[in-house]
Image (spheres, rainbow, N blue to C red):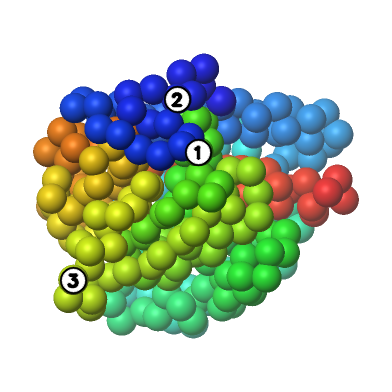
Amino acid sequence: MSSSAVSSGVVSSGVVSSGTARLLPGGPVAQQVLGEVAAEVAALRAAGVTPSLATVLVGDDDASAGYIRIKQRQAAELGFASPHVHLAASASQADLHRVIEGFNSDAGVHGVLVQHPIPGHLDYDRALQVLDPDKDVDGMHPVNMGRLALGLPGPLPCTPAGIEALLAFHGVPVAGREVVVLGRGATLGRPLAMLLAQKRPTANAAVTVVHTGVADWPRYTRRAEILVAAVGVPGIVRPEHVRAGAVVVGGGVRYEGRRLLPDVDESCARVAGAITPRVGGVGPTTVAMLFRNAVAAARRAAGLG
């Protein structure tokens, strides 16, 4: 955890405005998590187990191909094997399922990632249900979402887990505080609400989920001690939607070409006590949690817990 646990107006008893928000970068969090992953990989390899994260790309979307390259590069740096299958954009649902089933049956593959989005004629949810839930490094299989809801062990959705880790690393108190999640999506808003409400020192919050279907959603965000934007609508959160001194986490993004457009307008830094940066906030922690899930899958497969 960062030594600057409480600063710039973020205090355990409440929130006050400081005038200049403290930045909450995700890079140092990711470095810490990946360092732990690297140590676990070394222990596995010493025991004769090479952890393996398989990736599947369908089509030729440049951004998706770039994400796969980043993950493969990170896998190599950590000591993972990284088998990869690239299907043509014209691939059928059956083609995709065959690839997933092949990785399911391969004992040498411990985690599988199907890069999203996939071409529009394919059903991602159907493909996800084919995947062995114990190899689901994204934590999005219905079985794993059920495990999360029940508080059972299993891979956690990467972006929500990354946000919890980011808040803990930067010393932001969460337990007992009012957290408002703007957005109810299956990949972020809903699982994050379940995660932060669980009884753990880095969670245990009073969590409200609100969304743009609520006409007066700012009434909820303005009372939040911790506000997480998870909508995917660029600039939807502006200073007038933020309580003075609150902690603001930008989880939702959209891309315009290669330009990242976050939910949280940068002017919110004038009001917030602490805020994630436009670039390098939640993103690095999401990738780190992917590899944390993958190495945990390898440990389970090896009978090491």
Going by the image, does 264 lie left or right of 297?
Answer: left
Seen at 83% across and 49% down, the residue is 305
Q: Which numbered marker is on residue 6?
A: 2
Number of numbered callouts drawn: 3
Q: Position of residue 293 (x, y in %)?
A: 62, 49
Q: Given the image, on which type of amino acid does mark 1 rest?
A: Pro
Circle 1: element type: loop
Density class for disc 3 (Cα within 10 Å; few <14, some 14-19, many ≥20) is few
CA separation in Å, label 3 and label 2: 32 Å
Residue denoted by label 1 = 173
Residue denoted by label 3 = 216
Mark positioned earlier in the residue sequence (1 or 2): 2
- Outermost residue toward the front? 13
CA separation in Å, label 1 and label 3: 27 Å
CA separation in Å, label 1 and label 2: 9 Å
Q: Given the image, on which type of amino acid does mark 2 rest?
A: Val
Q: Nearer the viewer, residue 4 or 293?
A: 4
Going by the image, does 16 lie left or right of 76?
Answer: left
Circle 3: element type: loop
Mark positioned earlier in the residue sequence (1 or 3): 1
| Viewer can see residue 85 | no
